Image: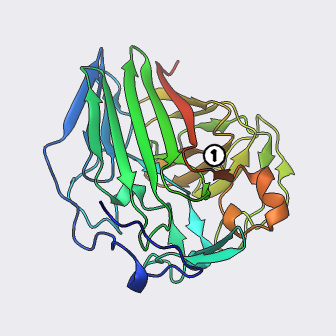
Amino acid sequence: MRRPCRRTATFTGSGACRKGPTVPMPSPEPLEIRRGPFVARFAPQNGGRMTHLRHAAMGDILVPTPDASFDPLYWPKAGAYPLFPYHNRLIGAAFVHEGRRYLVKAHPALGTDAVHGPAHRRPWHVISRGDDRLVLALDYQADEDWPFDFRATQAFRLHPDGLEVVLTLGNTGRENMPSGFGWHPYFAAGLGKQVFCDAAKRWPLDAVGIPSGVPPEARAGNEPFPDEAFTEHLSEWSRAAAVLDGGAQITLAADWALPHLVAHRMPSYICLEPVSHVAGAFGFPPHSRAETGLRIQAPGEERSARISLRMTAKT
């Protein structure tokens, strides 16, 4: 039996039970599911990624992943990947939980900060597979990238008009765990394409582009996004949409467990990321964390969320 990691107030690489990957991720044969005009491809061992999502008549929905073999710390801006057990920047690669301070390994490109959690930098395995569906899982053991054990699953199912994704996160350790999750797609929509979200609130950002802890501002649900590169952190949304380079329109929705959305636009893609908590919430004052969606999961506790992606021809 594997001896569990011993938690300490400072959890660093030298004392970790297992180090994270330091070599390029493998490039196995991709898995594929199909239904009607849709085809989705996956590289489970490369972080549980969806590498392609394409419609036979309307082209790429996600930016296609050019090469499934890559350094896990410098992933391609393509496809879609899971965000467990937090998303966006973890300032100082540190957080305080139940009175104790934990350190995780910083990302080498971000100075002292960590980012997006370790799940998309670990090999996942297949639980089940059908012609139009796939379920992937990650059984994570505490290490220098995250000091708690957890199990994450992604269940994908194609529909005649799009895709459904169900994310599940369970605490498999023996201690309470702070947690969040989400999904990070890169949609194939360059500048000049319409993007919409009906979010009612927008969070003020700090110098590195994440919420600063200042309460969110009201936002008109029909307020247009700028036709330039931007990043916005939004809350109280029910629908987001974008016109893709191929001319189709995608509409994204999620259930109550993902009440926040990150919209990140660059010249060749738009990310619309449904997430459970506000970015930067680990650094907010403890009394205000409950309002951010950040949760504490007890041992054995599980939480899930459902995302739907629908595609229509732009009229």
x and y percentages locating residue 298 in the rendered image: 62, 50
Instruction: Inspect this view and state whether residue 249 appears.
Output: yes
Location of residue 167 with respect to 9 vertically, above or below:
above
Instruction: Look at 76% across and 34% down and name the residue there.
Output: 222
Q: Is residue 271 left or right of residue 292?
A: left
The answer to which quarter of the image holds residue 223 is top right
Closer to the camera in the image, 279 or 295: 295
SS assignment at label 1: loop
Return the residue found at the far left.
29
x and y percentages locating residue 314 in the rendered image: 50, 22
For label 1, the crowd category at 10 Å Cα-Cα, with few meaning under 14, some 14 to 19 and many 20 or more, is: many
Instruction: Look at 41% across and 40% down and name the residue there.
Output: 153
Closer to the camera in the image, 7 or 239: 7
Instruction: Look at 63% across and 46% down and name the residue there.
Output: 276
Location of residue 304 with respect to 192 vertically, above or below:
above
Q: On the image, numbered disc 1 is attached to which residue? A: 276
Return the residue found at the far front.
1
Instruction: Look at 67% across and 75% down and name the residue there.
Output: 100
In the image, what residue type sits under mark 1?
Ser
Q: Is residue 114 left or right of residue 201?
A: left
x and y percentages locating residue 25 in the rendered image: 23, 61
